[in-house]
Image (cartoon, grey):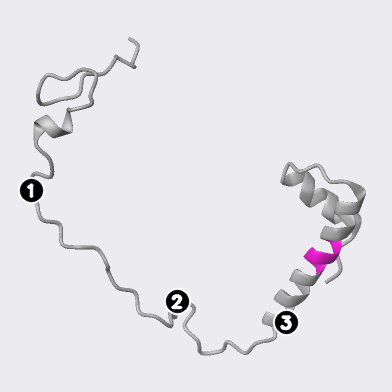
Amino acid sequence: MKLSKEEVKHIALLSRLSLTEEEVEMFQEQLSDILTFVEKLNELDTEGIDPKFQIIPAENVLREDIPGISFSYEKTFMNAPETDGKHFIVPKVVKK
């Protein structure tokens, strides 16, 4: 699929890009090549293939969530500017 210069300029406008005339010509060629490749993919016979098919099965790679104390309060608040020993004290950010 061959894109026109006007189409490339429109895509650039939607993307908030300002392109020189040389860049428009370069991207016209590159984007046209990409669309031609995608058109070739449309020629593949995908009848009977599950659209959610994955080659590698999905598996959870996270560790088991075991509750526990990671750091002591002293170590946690070591560099905090202000605490009450169990909480960080921060400036109020909500106005009434």
Mark 2 or mark 3, earlier in chain: 3
The location of residue 8, given as percent across then percent down, is: 83, 55
Q: Nearer the viewer, residue 59 or 87?
A: 87
* Quadrant housing the C terminus: top left
Which amino acid, by three-letter code, is at mark 2? Lys
**Quadrant housing residue 91:** top left
For marks 3 and 1, give the CA distance. 54 Å
Q: Identify the residue at image location x=86%, y=59%.
A: 26
Mark 3 or mark 1, earlier in chain: 3
- Residue 52, disc: 2
For marks 2 and 1, give the CA distance. 38 Å
Q: Is residue 19 left or right of residue 43?
A: right
Which of label 2 and label 3 is nearer to you? 3
Q: Is mark 1 on a helix, strand or loop?
A: loop
The range drawn in magenta is: 28-32
Badge 3 is on which residue? Answer: 40
Which of label 3 and label 1 is nearer to you? 1
Badge 1 is on which residue? Answer: 68
Which amino acid, by three-letter code, is at mark 1? Gly
The location of residue 87, given as percent across then percent down, is: 15, 25
Does 2 appear above or below 5?
A: below
Q: What element carries label 3?
A: helix
